Amino acid sequence: QVTDTLPREDPSSPSYDWFQTESSVTIVIYTKRKNINLASVMVDLQDDSLRAEVVINDHSYLIHIELSHEVQENFSVRVIENVGKVDVILQKRENIPWKCLGQPLEKHDSFIPKKDAGLYYRKCQLISKEDVTHDTRLFCLMLPPSTHLQVPVGHHVYLKLSVTGAEIVKPYTPVSESLLSDFKEPVLPPNKYIYFLIKIYPDGLFTPELDRLQIGDFVSVSSPEGNFKLSRLQEVEDLFLLAAGTGFTPMVNVLNYSLTHMSSLRKVKLMFFNKTEDDIIWRCQLEKLAFKDKRFDIEFVLSAPSSEWNGKRGHVSPALLSEFLQRSLENSRVFLCICGPTPFTDEGIRLLHDLNFDTEEIHGFTA
Ligand code: FAD
Ligand code: NAD
């Protein structure tokens, strides 16, 4: 066994090592923390340059190496959670012994605050595009075969396009393919497709360009970002989701997760604010889900309804919220998520405080 690691000054910093068999090379990252999972690890292999980033709390540890020999594009990633160990297992192209792992590249073996680490983008191919409403589409992108990337529930990525030489970047929240397919924990390898529900604004900067892409064209996708923590849902009995327009997107995976993974859950209720009936994303799926799973209730509120609309009307208001936010049991443990246009989210959070919900019981999805 050959090691490239030098003793580090701080013994709590992550470190790495490697070993080989006849056909494989395994890079072992010792994070020295326990709260690591497959979504904490991003690996990109481009030609022979390997980039493996592990997010450890608010820090990022990077392995960045020009490998000494060629490897196959498929590799596997394994996390041993109780010891915080990450294995990246590469398959050699030729079964010959390696004398060294390779040459260090920029920021190799660095452990820095995540905010200083910068975003890494990989090129993903547009696989399909489907109309969901008159102005919102479901985009499916395929990750490169040599990428391991999972987006944690409630996190977003940045999409980047080059338009006449200028780069445009905007954040988007991945969703599951549908609300009705069985939710799979985002740990099942290989996670090759990412879905997005994106509203096209005809006079917007980014979305018309995205909409112009042809199947097979490429979009760059960043590593995930976000501050939503699943641990906040622990022991929650009543989960209330307040979404407006495409502010629905972070609710998709929160909803899926709550119905499949929260044993404490008694009720999850979504209040979905839109301008008109035609603007409601996945209305039919939401209604089917509410029919299928009695723990889930949906309430639509329209701000510019047609005269035929019999449901709730208006903008977010004390009257709408106090009627909606009924606990299934007195003193049940609650959590609320809110997302939409900034004035909606700000006003909603203010009203929730007026209704005596604590800051710790509320997550506002913002930029
Ligand atoms: P923009 O150029 O930003 O314009 C949008 C609209 O605002 C247009 O109608 C434009 O005319 C108008 N406008 C622009 N500037 C002004 C101004 N100064 N005054 C008045 N009007 C103006 N969107 C989704 O569809 N799906 C998602 O999953 C999603 N996830 C997000 C996650 C996060 C964390 C955040 C912060 C945003 C998310 N968004 C999402 C919104 C997305 O990032 C973009 O803001 C959106 O797609 C609009 O981009 P655009 O460049 O096409 O439009
Ligand atoms: P929209 O214009 O279709 O409005 C949807 C509903 O939002 C309206 O019916 C109304 O009830 C409410 N609303 C709009 N403006 C309001 C105001 N000034 N005050 C109170 N309520 C208001 O919405 P859209 O075009 O789909 O926009 C969705 C917004 O959600 C975008 O601004 C997007 O950036 C944001 N978003 C944020 C995230 C995130 O994670 N931070 C994720 C997805 C979307």
Image (cartoon, helix red, strand yellow):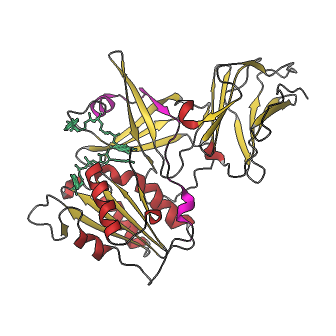
x, y percent for residue 121: 51, 28
Residue reaching furthest left?
A: 307
Picture coordinates of residue 144, whole percent (x, y): 56, 31
- Residue lying farthest top? 165
Above or below — where is 304 with respect to 141? Answer: below
- Residue placed furthest toward the right: 1
For the image, the number of numbered tags is 0
- Does residue 225 belong to the magenta stretch? yes
What stretch of residues is rendered in magenta? 207-235
The quarter in which the N terminus is drawn is: top right
Q: Which of 299 and 130 is in front in this view?
A: 299
In this rendering, would 233 be left or right of 299?
right
The x and y percentages for residue 47 are: 64, 19
User: Which image quadrant for residue 55?
Assistant: top right
Q: Quadrant of the C terminus?
A: top left
Identify the image quadrant of residue 97.
top right
Which residue lies at the image location 83% right of the left edge and 20% below the top edge? Answer: 100
- Above or below: residue 208 compared with residue 276: above
Asked if 94 appears above or below 174 in the picture, the reply is above
Q: From this viewpoint, is residue 51 visible? A: yes
- The residue at 74%/38% (across/down) is 13
Q: Inspect this view and state whether residue 341 appears.
A: no
In the image, 160 versus 355, the foreground residue is: 355
Nearest the eye: 26 or 54: 54
- Outermost residue to the bottom: 330
Q: Where does residue 90 sit, x and y in percent of width and height? A: 75, 31
Q: Is residue 83 above or below residue 239?
A: above
Q: In this view, does 277 lie to the left or right of 239?
A: left
Check if residue 1 falls in the magenta segment: no
